[in-house]
Amino acid sequence: MRSDLIFGALTHVTNRYELCQLASKATRKLHKPNTRLQDTTNEVLDRFKDTVPMDDASEPVEKITHSRAA
């Protein structure tokens, strides 16, 4: 059931809103034509259950701003 997959994924992503955002982005990236979207979503949630989608060890990439000379 999908609810089991969601609760399993919540062990690694504690914020439900963030889980929805990550799952929707991953579903868009991993979806293949001629397959059901529901199956792709279930696969993404299953992957989140097994692995940590947002690793705490990785640091966020800082945005570099370039100033333009006038």
Image: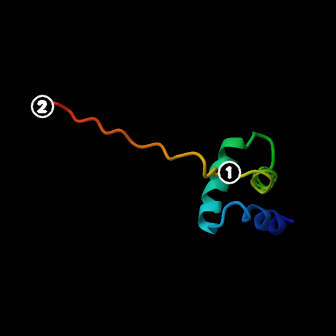
Give the image location of residue 16, x and y in percent.
64, 68
Q: Which mark is residue 53?
A: 1
**Identity of the residue furthest to the left in this view:** 70
**Lower sequence index among marks 2 and 1:** 1
Label 1, residues with CA under 10 Å away: few <14, some 14-19, many ≥20: some
Work out whether residue 58 or residue 65 is closer to the camera in this orientation and state it.
58
Q: Is residue 67 left or right of residue 17?
A: left
Residue beneath label 2, please? 70
Q: Amino acid at mark 2?
A: Ala
Image coordinates for residue 20, horizontal then vertical, percent: 64, 61
Measure the C-alpha gap from mark 2 to mark 1. Answer: 43 Å
Q: Residue at x 58, y 45 (%)?
A: 58
Identify whether 46 is placed above or below 11. Answer: above
Residue drawn at the location 67% of the way across and 48% of the way down: 26
Q: Is residue 68 left or right of residue 56?
A: left
Viewed as shown, does residue 16 lie left or right of 7?
A: left
